[in-house]
Image: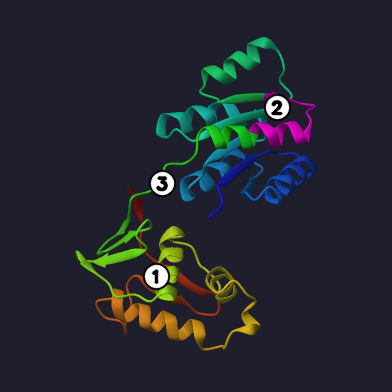
Amino acid sequence: MSQEILLLEDDDSLNHSVSLKLKKEGYTVYSAFTVKEAVSIYQQKDLSLIICDITLPDGTGLDFCSRVRRESDILFLFLTALDREDDIMAGYRQGADDYITKPFSLPVLIVKVNALLKRFPPEESKFIISESITLYPAEKRAMKNGVYLNLTAKEYSLLSFFMENPMRILSRNQLLEAIWDIEGNFVDENTLSVNIRRLREKIEDNPSMPALLKNVRGLGYIWERKCEKR
């Protein structure tokens, strides 16, 4: 999966252009325009980097950085028009890994982002646990209550995709494109349903009343339990 970046920038045009360029580089980008939106994304996503303005409609990037630093070591880059020496020093004191002043060169920003993420790659999780299910990405295997599950390659891929995106509704098209890597209309309409049913038979205590992997009528499916990476 691609590394995930949160971009907190209240200027619509700048947010769009930076986000678009980062996506072209292969990153997953979540755009926020207020501190409140950014906090919500930060709490829900497995971020590798936060790019943040300082002057924002509902607070400051400095306060947001301070909060993040109390809780995690996510890479943090300020992108701001505040270019005085005192401002830059304040940014680094709050825990920033880099500080870029506006106006700036978009190619230079991308080079800095690539360098940061290459220098500090995310640690690979040895396993992901969600109640009775434990996923081992390196082995491409999973256990239930300490017993290895006999999963097909597609069943494992589905389970992995759900546990990498817990508490999030995933549409049928998203699942088909992620697991089969083609547009949904080229796959038999029952393919996903059959694989979901077979997976449930192996992971659920009561497959007819699933507690982990649930349908969301008209929208798709959701892994309705928290997942912890260790």
Where are the magenta residues, as a range? 100-112
- Of labels 2 and 1, earlier in sequence is 2
Which percent across, then down, holds residue 175? 53, 72
Q: Secondary structure at mark 2?
A: strand
- Of labels 3 and 2, earlier in sequence is 2
Q: Marks 2 and 1, how far apart in space?
A: 43 Å
- Residue at image mark 3: 124
Q: Are marks 3 and 2 in contact (CB under 8 Å)?
A: no
- Residue at image mark 1: 156
- What type is the residue that disc 1 sits on? Tyr
- Residue at image mark 2: 80
**Which residue is drawn at the image coordinates 26% and 66% (left, top)?**
143
Q: How is the image coloured?
A: rainbow
- Is-magenta flag for residue 104? yes
- What type is the residue that disc 2 sits on? Thr
Q: How many marks?
A: 3
Crowd band around label 1 with a 10 angstrom C-alpha radius: few (<14), some (14–19), many (20+): many
Which percent across, then down, holds residue 38? 57, 42
Task: Give the number of the mark in front: 3 or 2.
Answer: 3
